Amino acid sequence: MAASETQLYVDKHVAYIKSLGDNKDDLTYHMTAHLRMNAIYWGLTALCIMGHKEALDREEMIDFVMSCWDDEAGGFGAHPDHDAHLLATTSAIQILVTHDALDRVDKARVARLVILSLQQPSGVFAGDSFGEIDTRFSYCAVNSLSLLGCLSDLDVEKTVSYIRACRNYDGGFGNCIGAETHAGQVFVCVAALAILDRLDEVDHETLGWWLAERQLPNGGLNGRPEKLEDVCYSFWCLSAMSILDKLSWIDSDKLISFVLSAQDSEGGGIADRPGDMVDVFHTHFGIAGLSLLGYPGLIDLDPVYCMPAHIIEAMGLRKGWKALPRRKT
């Protein structure tokens, strides 16, 4: 059921996230095992931004993360007995950092055996030993190395050169060389360059306009021209705009109304658009977008790392992004 367009149902969303792991006999629970580590990160970060980090048990969460350790590879899988992958490893590191538990892992081993061994001669990263490449994985590598304190081990110029080669005439980036611009890929490339202090590679004005043009008449954002609006782009687009200091280029009131209209006011959670089924992915990214838009009562989100801003600031890793001022209730 769609909610009104004026209120974020925090208590409902907290209860929804807490309920996600309750029914382990449900077929959907087992069919999404390959996303489990990512889903825990999404849920935890959404709870943090809503000011309810304590809603999920800290030790239980850390125990699950460590149960996904792939000792042969030296990284984390999405679920116990799954092979290590950069996506799951990044989420695992983010969860451990959020819970101040990064001392549970051998940082140098993760950096050396999982992340740095996956960089290809072209500069892009593969997600795992099977060799799929994507600029998402470059972001995961840069993000993870930064959080681990091992960024100095990275060949920065080789990493940047591949991202540069993925830049398109519209100022945006694709998932590989020659691929069309997509808002998700814009985020990963811009954020990776921000971490590496190489935003000089970005055409701020051209890309800013491309991102601003993703807003549709109903207030929602799409990921590329002629596509439907989707709540998750409230983060993918806004994060890059925040890093480029272009958030004022969109109608924030209309976007807030769109995100709130995609809530389930009874069961909690946020869907991709009004009337669809909710999921933790869109719940997380909808709340993340609302934080960047200055929605009242939320905790500041760092758009570069997609983590609570105070954690990143305490680590000395904050970059020069700007969110909209926090609104008063």
Image: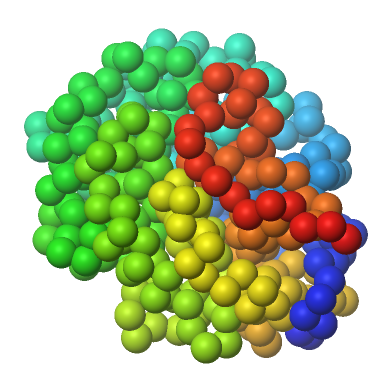
Q: Position of residue 254 (x, y in %)?
A: 63, 78
Residue 40 visible? The answer is: no
Q: Residue at x 29, y 14 (%)?
A: 153
Q: Quadrant of the C terminus?
A: bottom right
User: Viewer-proximal residue, 57 or 298?
Assistant: 298
State whether residue 152 is above or below residue 70: above
User: Viewer-proximal residue, 20 or 209?
Assistant: 209
User: Viewer-proximal residue, 5 or 92?
Assistant: 5
State whether residue 122 is above or below residue 260: above
Q: State left or right for residue 91 relative to residue 267.
A: left
Q: Residue at x 46, y 57 (%)?
A: 246
Q: Quadrant of the N terminus?
A: bottom right
The colour scheme of the drawn protein is rainbow
The quarter of the displayed image where residue 96 is located: top right
Q: Position of residue 313 (x, y in %)?
A: 61, 26
Q: State left or right for residue 173 relative to residue 187.
A: left
- Total marks in image: 0
Q: State left or right for residue 304 relative to residue 251.
A: left
The quarter of the displayed image where residue 276 is located: bottom right
User: Viewer-proximal residue, 137 or 187?
Assistant: 187
Q: Residue at x 71, y 64 (%)?
A: 26
Q: Position of residue 149 (x, y in %)?
A: 45, 15
State whether residue 181 is above or below residue 316: below
Q: Position of residue 285 (x, y in %)?
A: 60, 59
Q: Residue at x 81, y 67 (%)?
A: 8
Residue 258 visible? The answer is: yes
